[in-house]
């Protein structure tokens, strides 16, 4: 296996401070993929036992929450073989560190009923992964501020619970509540005005601008921001 990059410290690919490993090789070729150079399986450097030692040393730092596996495609068969010794070592030597993995495969149609059942490497690999973000990146479903996913078709999955239940168990933290239940995002009015030109229609429809002064007072008093307060604020300020 080759890898394109090791990012440290990484704060974008998962929760907390992380070590992110970008493996090389991906056959999905999603439109507007950000890591096109890593489609090539021979891109980057050879992944060796020294690379594993390097990652382990970074993970040992007490402030590091875990390891993120991205690509390229971590679940390409050749990459699964390459990653297995790493994830096993992390869970054996540093069991408190979590492991997140991004894949273009769909968990409930490709991974659980097929790869997991047919390939013992996949089975071993999945035993060691905590959270998986699945599905190919879809530019038409892209929203700029999604948490740990690029497009709304992708899902954050609790891998261990899914394996026990035999079905996909989703995790919905971050953005899902806002985009999937249509609960609006609350944004300061000034911030909304500044960013409005960059918002897609979907984002704009899901955003309620709130006057800074009134909003700030509620925050200072630690009061919950109620729907009524927001509506009154909008009406009082005549926000267009
Ligand atoms: S699965 Fe990921 S790395 Fe592969 S083409 Fe899609 S976005 Fe790019």
Image (tube, rainbow, N blue to C red):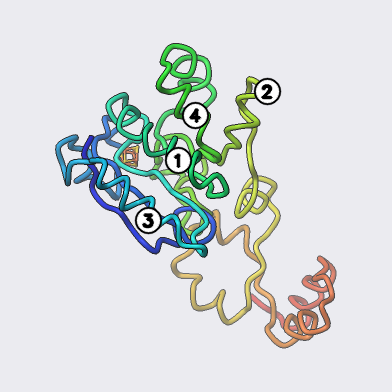
Q: Which residue is mark 3?
A: 57
How many other residues sit within 10 Å of disc 4, few (<14), some (14-19) or many (≥20)? many
Q: Label 2's element?
A: helix
The residue mark sitting in front, 1 or 3, is 3
Pick whichever of labels 4 and 1 is earlier in the sequence: 1
Q: Is residue 202 left or right of residue 39?
A: right
Distance (Cα) linking label 2 and label 4: 14 Å
The residue mark sitting in front, 4 or 3, is 3
Q: Which residue is mark 4?
A: 126
Residue 113 point in image, percent of width and height: 52, 15
Q: Is residue 143 left or right of residue 69?
A: right
The residue sitting at the top extreme is 118
How many other residues sit within 10 Å of disc 3, few (<14), some (14-19) or many (≥20)? few
The residue mark sitting in front, 2 or 4, is 4
Q: Is residue 114 left or right of residue 85?
A: right
Tell me the quarter of the image containing the N terminus: top left
Distance (Cα) linking label 4 and label 3: 23 Å
What label sits on residue 165 in the rendered view?
2
The residue mark sitting in front, 3 or 2, is 3
Nearer-the-camera pick, 7 or 215: 7
């Amino acid at each position: 296996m080759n890898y394109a990059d090791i990012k440290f410290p990484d704060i974008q690919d998962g929760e907390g401070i992380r070590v992110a490993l970008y493996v090389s090789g991906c056959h999905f070729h999603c439109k507007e993929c950000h890591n096109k150079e890593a489609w090539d399986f021979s891109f980057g450097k050879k992944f060796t036992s020294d690379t594993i030692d390097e990652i382990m040393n970074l993970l040992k730092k007490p402030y590091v929450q875990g390891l993120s596996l991205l690509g390229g495609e971590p679940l390409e068969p050749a990459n699964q073989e390459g990653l297995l010794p790493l994830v096993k070592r992390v869970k054996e030597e540093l069991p408190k560190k979590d492991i997140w993995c991004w894949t273009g495969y769909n968990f409930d149609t490709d991974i659980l009923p097929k790869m997991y059942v047919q390939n013992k490497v996949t089975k071993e690999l999945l035993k060691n992964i905590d959270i998986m973000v699945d599905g190919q990146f879809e530019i038409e479903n892209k929203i700029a501020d999604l948490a740990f996913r690029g497009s709304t078709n992708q899902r954050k999955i609790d891998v261990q619970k899914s394996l026990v239940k035999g079905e996909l168990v989703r995790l919905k933290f971050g953005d899902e509540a806002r985009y999937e239940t249509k609960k609006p995002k609350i944004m300061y009015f000034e911030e909304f005005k500044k960013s409005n030109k960059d918002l897609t229609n979907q984002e704009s429809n899901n955003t309620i601008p709130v006057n800074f002064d009134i909003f700030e007072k509620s925050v200072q008093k630690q009061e919950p921001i109620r729907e009524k307060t927001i509506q009154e604020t909008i009406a009082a300020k005549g926000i267009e």
